[in-house]
Structures are given as C-alpha cells and as structure tokens.
Image (spheres, rainbow, N blue to C red):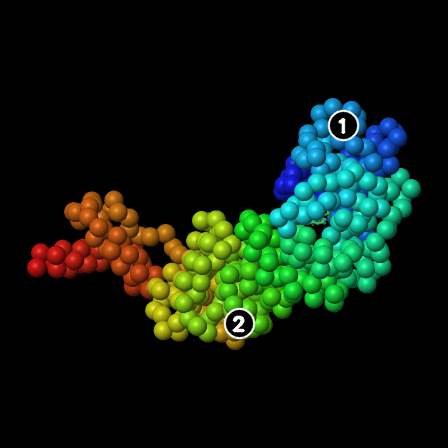
C-alpha cells in the first residue's frame, strides 16, 4: 500500500529470512500492545506463490499516533492516510492502519481515508490476489476477497466493481498487466474489459509512474506477454502516445531472459515500426514520452544504429565488421537479430567467431603521440589517420608498429598535400 504516496523504500539487505524475522518482531510488538495486526498484500501473495518476499507491509488496527507510541522513531510517510514507516535493523516496514479510501480526486489518490477494520482494508486493495492477510503466528491466511481461489486459478481480478476500481486509480491498469505477465496469470474478463474501456485515461497518470511500471515489465523475462497484453488492451496508445498497433511483438518475446530495458525498448520499436523505416525518430518520441534517462536513450539509439548496420553485414569489409562486432551494445543487437532471423544470426555468429581469431578489437598499434613524434601536426587529421591505420590493422594488412608508422606517413602525406592544394 505504500505506493499510495511514494515509491517503496529500498532495503539494504535482501535476505528474506531476516526480512521476515524483522517483520514478525514489529507485528508482535503491535499485537502485544493489543492491536489486531497482519502481514498484508504483496508479501502474502508472493509467499503463497513460493517466492520469498523481502518487502513486508504490515496492516494494523493501531492508529498512527498509537503506532508512534510503540515505535517512537516511526516516520510518518502519510499520517493522514495511516501509513507509518518503522525501521527494524536494516529493514524498513510500512505499518499502516486498516483503512477505507474516500473519494478519488485525481484518478490516483483518495481525498481522505477512514480508519476501519481488516475486512474493509482488504476491500480497498486493487486485486484479489493482493487483498490477502497473513497471520504468521497462527500460520493462517485471512481472505475476505476470494484471493486464495484466484491465486490458485492464476487470475487477476479487481476487488469489487472493476469499472469503478480502475476509474478510481488508473495506475491499477498497468499493475494488472504487470502481475498477469510476471506471474503468468490471466486477467479475468470483466477486469480486462474495464481496462480496455479506461485505457485511454491512463494519460492522466504521471510519466514517471508509467515509465516505472513499464521498466518493471520490460526487464522481466515475461516481457513478451506484457507487451502483447498492453497492445491487446489498448494501453500501448497512452503509454507510447501512438496509434494502436496489434502486430505481434515477436522480437520482444524472444529476447534472452536477462535483457535490459534499452534492449527491450529497441526490440519493441523494431517490432512496431521497422516496416515504416525511421526507428530513430520514434526513439526520440519515446524518449520524451517515457522520460528515458540519457543513459537509456543513448543505449537505445546505439542498439538501433547497430541494428541498421547489421542489416548490411554481408556488404561490409573486415574492419567495419570488426568495429561493429566490438561495439559496446552489439550483444543487444545480436540478441534482437537472433529473435528476428535465426539463420542470419547463426551466419553472423560464425563470421564473428572467425574474425575473433585475428582480434576483434586489438590494442591499436599507433596512438596520437606516435603520430606527433613522426612530425604529423596535431590537427583534426590525427583522428582520420589513426582510424585509417587501425582499419588496416583490423583488416590484417599491417601487423607491427613499423608497418603502422610507414602507413601513417603515407596517409599523412596524402592528407596534408590534399590540404595544400
Ligand atoms: P510489488 O511490490 O511486486 O509491486 P505489491 O502488490 O506488493 O507488488 P506494492 O506497491 O508493494 O505492490 O503495494 C502493496 C499492497 O498495497 C498491494 O499488494 C495492494 O494490496 C496494495 N496496493 C498497492 N497499490 C495499490 C493501488 N494502486 N490500489 C489499491 N491497492 C494497492
Ligand atoms: Mg510490494
């Protein structure tokens, strides 16, 4: 529930056993003071899915001031909403009073909340699988919303009326897709219909939030399913600011599991736009739309440039092939090629293995100082000469420093006498 007000705190340790032990201590202190208290939401779901949560949310009957009486150092991260942050060893826990949300003001945040009981607190949560409580002492799951059955049947279902719940908070549409894809669940029909109906309204949600959800989907190994669902439900339109496209995202779907965000974005751009040509223009639009960082954007641009160059592989000389194959982002580009044209991928891989034998990116035989030492004036021509000598080295035309110096002299004479003319 912490996402109501902010991103979740990052814990300094990821040890699931320690995280649970710490959560149990916090829960016990609240119970010892007489307050009904449970683990709640995602941590309960993940444990039932046999994942080991490292992030625990604790839901309690204690009001914020009562939580502070027990944990004097508790930080208020939204006292009006009943959310306090309690530190125990290196872990931070959201401790939140059972609440019902009031009216939603901006399709994201309720205007007020009313402190209630566990049952009503379950009902204000988004999906049935996220509406479970765990009593870790009795080893019991408390289920007011049918979440256990849906977990078992692998279904994402809005709690209550899906239209109302998704209209209240549009971010829930993206959460539905993320959970469905990441857990390989399906979205129940009425919930899916409601998403399709409200999809266009997602543009009201901040780009940071949308980008954050998209990052989590595209860096997960089930990214192909996520992208397919986004397109199928019409969420690609507000997310990307484009027309709906239903073309199967085959490249995205076939990427290696550990592919990063820029690689997945590049694969998705090519899946959606390669037939029209200018993918770099689209990348520029996505940069603004998804608030890509400079690092993400330059990686995306490089992958797309390399992908275009790779299409001309057979026409390239040895030096160009070696330069291409040793570019930092070439592995991402090769992963996309593998997803789109397996025979070509095998062909390129074999060619690279051969090129590798003579060095893909050997240390250059010459540097700028060497050129200056043989009397080349320190002008912009230095870079051109070094590039040409390095090309000759990559082609295997020169193998020693002496060869390199002789060649550099010839090229330098050429360039400098051209300049004199
Ligand atoms: P994950 O941490 O993997 O994103 P999560 O379900 O734990 O999944 P959190 O953002 O940590 O997500 O939220 C914890 C719980 O708070 C959820 O399980 C859910 O019960 C509730 N919750 C979170 N966001 C919303 C929302 N937008 N609307 C309603 N309930 C929400
Ligand atoms: Mg969580």
| Residue at 64% from the left image edge and 51% from the top image edge | 107
* 215 lies above or below 82: below
Q: Where is residue 420 in the image (x, y as percent from the top left)?
A: 9, 56
Q: Nearer the viewer, residue 164 or 119?
A: 164
In-front residue for pair 408/219: 219
In the image, residue 314 lies at what x, y percent? 39, 74
Q: Is residue 373 above or below residue 339?
A: above
Of the two numbered discs 2 and 1 on the same chain, state the one appearing first in sequence.
1
Give the x, y percent position of residue 372.
Answer: 20, 45
Q: Of the residues tagged 2 and 1, which is closer to the observer? A: 1
Tell me the CA gap for discs 2 and 1: 58 Å
Q: Mark 2 points at which residue?
A: 340
Tell me: residue 61, above or below residue 241: above
Q: In this view, does 404 lie to the left or right of 42?
A: left
Element type where label 1 sits in the image: helix
Q: Does the residue labelled 1 lie within 8 Å of ligand 1?
A: no
Q: Is residue 411 toward the left or the right of residue 274 in the image?
A: left
317 vs 170, nearest the viewer: 170
Residue on which disc 1 sits: 65
Residue at 79%, 38% (x, y): give it.
115
Residue under the image location 48 percent in, 58 percent down: 286
Q: Is residue 29 left or right of residue 282?
A: right
């Amino acid at each position: 529930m912490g996402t109501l007000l902010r991103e979740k705190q990052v814990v300094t340790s990821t040890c699931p056993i320690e995280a649970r032990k710490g959560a149990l201590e916090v829960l016990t202190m609240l119970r010892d003071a007489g307050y009904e208290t449970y683990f709640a939401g995602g941590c309960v779901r993940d444990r039932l899915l046999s994942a080991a949560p490292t992030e625990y949310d604790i839901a309690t009957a204690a009001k914020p001031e009562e939580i502070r009486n027990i944990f004097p150092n508790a930080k208020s991260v939204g006292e009006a909403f009943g959310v306090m942050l309690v530190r125990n060893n290196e872990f931070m826990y959201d401790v939140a009073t059972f609440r019902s949300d009031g009216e939603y003001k901006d399709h994201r945040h309720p205007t007020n909340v009313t402190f209630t009981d566990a049952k009503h607190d379950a009902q204000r949560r988004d999906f049935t699988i996220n509406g479970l409580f765990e009593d870790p002492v009795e080893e019991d799951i408390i289920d007011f919303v049918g979440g256990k059955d849906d977990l078992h049947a692998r279904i994402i279902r809005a709690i209550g009326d899906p239209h109302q719940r998704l209209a209240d908070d549009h971010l829930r549409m993206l959460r539905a897709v993320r959970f469905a894809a990441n857990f390989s669940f399906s979205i129940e029909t009425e919930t899916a219909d409601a998403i399709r109906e409200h999809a266009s309204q997602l543009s009201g949600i901040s780009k940071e939030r949308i980008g954050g959800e998209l990052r989590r989907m595209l860096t997960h190994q089930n990214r192909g399913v996520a992208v397919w669902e986004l397109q199928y439900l019409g969420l690609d339109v507000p997310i990307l600011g484009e027309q709906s496209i239903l073309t199967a995202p085959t490249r995205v779907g076939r990427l290696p599991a550990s592919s990063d965000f820029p690689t997945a974005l590049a694969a998705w751009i090519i899946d959606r736009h390669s037939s029209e040509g200018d993918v770099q223009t689209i990348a520029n639009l996505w940069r603004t739309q998804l608030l890509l960082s400079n690092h993400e954007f330059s990686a995306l641009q490089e992958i797309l440039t390399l992908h275009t160059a790779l299409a001309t592989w057979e026409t390239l000389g040895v030096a160009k092939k070696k330069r291409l194959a040793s570019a930092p982002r070439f592995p991402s580009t090769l992963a996309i090629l593998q997803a789109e044209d397996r025979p070509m991928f095998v062909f390129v891989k074999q060619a690279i293995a051969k090129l590798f034998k003579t060095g893909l990116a050997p240390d250059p035989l010459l540097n700028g100082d060497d050129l200056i030492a043989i009397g080349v004036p320190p002008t912009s021509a230095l870079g051109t000469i070094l590039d040409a000598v390095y090309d000759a080295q990559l082609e295997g035309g020169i193998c020693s420093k002496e060869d390199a110096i002789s060649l550099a002299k010839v090229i330098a004479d050429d360039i400098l006498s051209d300049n004199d003319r």
